[in-house]
Amino acid sequence: MMTWGIVLIAVGIILFIMEAAEPGFFIAIPAGVLITLGFIIIAVPDFDLLSLWTPLIVALVVLPMMFLSMRYYQYISPPSKPTTTMTTSLEGKEGIVIKEIKPGEISGKVKVGDEIGGGWSATADEKIEEGARVRVKKSKGVHVVVERLN
């Protein structure tokens, strides 16, 4: 029976390591249960895992482990407001043309700052070729008006 206790503890420790490496799977709870049962089996060699006491012991371990895990995740990842980019916040920022800009059209595209993605629809007072550096003058709805940087 002691072998089963050691196996349960070992599996629990492996699960704890997996949780530490990639938090968020909540496998710390079953890990805590396995480790606790493993120590009980080692401490009380005559303990029967199929007894009526097993669910009670598991519940007494699971509830505190669940509470502690939730508190831990709140600590390492506090809730934060989602970040959004409004076109007005782009005014004055520099970018690069990723699709040619033509006057009077919003088919041009500009990548502003370090953003990832397809860029912003853009227009300008002059034709600006792909790869040129630009500055956002103003925003109009879902597109921006840019000017070439010299």
Image: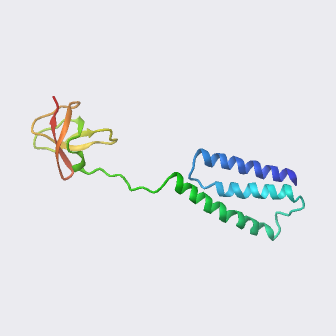
Q: Is residue 18 toward the left or the right of residue 75 in the image?
A: right
Residue at 12% x, 34% y is 127
Residue found 20% across the figure and 48% down from its top: 143
Residue furthest to the bottom in view is 52
Quadrant for the N terminus, please.
Answer: bottom right
Which residue appears at 69% of the width and 54% of the height? Answer: 31
Q: What is the quadrant of residue 107 in the picture?
A: top left
> Residue 71 location, x and y as percent?
57, 59
The way the protein has been coloured in the rendering is rainbow
- Residue closest to the far front: 75
Quarter of the picture holding the C terminus: top left
Extreme-top residue of the structure? 150
Q: Is residue 23 left or right of residue 145?
A: right
The reply, left or right, for residue 84 in relation to residue 127 is: right
Residue 76 pos. (x, y %)? 53, 51
Image quadrant in which you'd find residue 115: top left
In the rendered view, would you say 54 is above or below 38? below
The residue nearer to you, when weighing 141 against 43, is 43
Q: Residue at x 77, y 52 (%)?
A: 8
User: Left or right: 98 with respect to 24?
Assistant: left
Number of numbered discs overlaid on the protein picture: 0
Residue 68 % position (x, y): 62, 59
